[in-house]
Amino acid sequence: MLPEIRKRYNDSFSDETYGVFMEQINHDFPNSLEFRVAETPTFIPKALTEKLIQAGEDIIDVMVQPDFKAKTERAIPADQRVPNEDDICSLLTLDFAVCKDEHGEPTPQLIEMQGFATLYGYQAYIGDMYKRFFYFPDGFSEYFHGLDREGYLAELHKVFIGDGKAENTILLEIYPEIQKTRIDFAVTKDLLGIEAVCLTKVRKEGRKLYYEKDGRKIAIQRIYNRVIVDDLQNYPDLVTEFKLTDDVDVEWIAHPNWFFRASKFTLPLLNSPFVPKSYFLHELAEYPADLENYVLKPLFSFAGTGVKLHISKADLDAIPDKENFLLQRKVNYEPVVESPTG
């Protein structure tokens, strides 16, 4: 994609500059970075950008339909349903593959989706860092819909803090100081003033929640949720006053129920040229003849666990709980970022 821009970026790149870039990140947020940072951003052509935006609109159009909640009720495990769900999913993360369409042009194909947060703070910070240390072409921006950095941060403030005070919103996580995404927590605090608070540190008095800071008891009015419900199973001995399923006076961003509603469970409900065909296994009267072009995914597992890339009719017939699986058509990922070595 955009070969002239890619060539100019690659020609100007050096390991020395990348090293200084990494030193600056670690200086700004010490002991916070625990994942690899790409040597380059991805420069996206206008046509592909427009397709990505349209793909997002296609998906959201389905999610705001009056019957969407009824169609996704089964997605929420009974023992993990959280009260006081809102009508609209406040955060939505979409994972697209870049493929080629029938004309050989780059096109997005949805791979996963989740009604959950991504690294909103870090994304703003790392965009600034790429522009500071490396070649960045005129007319390009990491922000969509005409936003700039100021407008993007204003949107984050509106969603996470609203008309209240930053101290009354918390970023909720389990042991945030050891999470691999903790650099995002640090950037979020730096940009918005929102504290990362461990679930074990939340105090409950009736329907009210609090946390302590500098000897003060501070009311929690909004929870920017970063707790993946599935992860709670990894901490069977976790002792907390507050359980996510408690009925309390807080506003969730995003509400935990949307983690399940906007997920693999949604894929068969979508009809878009940017979404590979997906089917609930139990609703198929007969399997596709070309099963080699499909992947089998369990509905109620996360982070890619349980996915089968190679399946047969016998494999599908042997599944007793077909209502808990879907078939998704495979896509071909295109190598769209050329490195200096090819």
Image: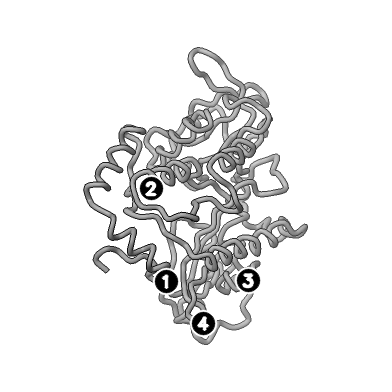
**Which amino acid does the dot numbered 1 rest on?**
Tyr
In the displayed structure, 312 sits above or below 133; it is: below
Name the residue nearer the viewer: 293 or 80: 293
Residues at marks 1 and 2, CA–CA distance in whole angstroms: 25 Å
On the image, numbered disc 3 is attached to which residue? Answer: 272
Local SS, label 3: loop
Residues at marks 4 and 3, CA–CA distance in whole angstroms: 17 Å
Dot placed on the residue nearer the N-terminal end, 1 or 2: 2
In the displayed structure, 83 sits above or below 336; it is: above
Dot placed on the residue nearer the N-terminal end, 1 or 3: 3
On the image, numbered disc 2 is attached to which residue? Answer: 130
Residues at marks 2 and 3, CA–CA distance in whole angstroms: 33 Å
Residues at marks 1 and 3, CA–CA distance in whole angstroms: 18 Å
Residue 218 vs residue 118: left or right?
A: right
Residue density around tag 3, few if under 14, some if 14–19, many if 20 or more, within 10 Å: some
Residues at marks 1 and 4, CA–CA distance in whole angstroms: 16 Å
Which of the labelled discs sits on residue 333, or is there none? 1
On the image, numbered disc 4 is attached to which residue? Answer: 103
**Which amino acid does the dot numbered 4 rest on?**
His
Please identify, in this view, whether the residue under mark 4 or under mark 2 is nearer the observer.
Answer: 2
Residue 74 location in percent, x, y?
65, 57
Residue density around tag 2, few if under 14, some if 14–19, many if 20 or more, within 10 Å: some
Colour convention: one colour
The quarter of the image holding the C terminus is bottom left
Residue 6 location in percent, x, y?
36, 63
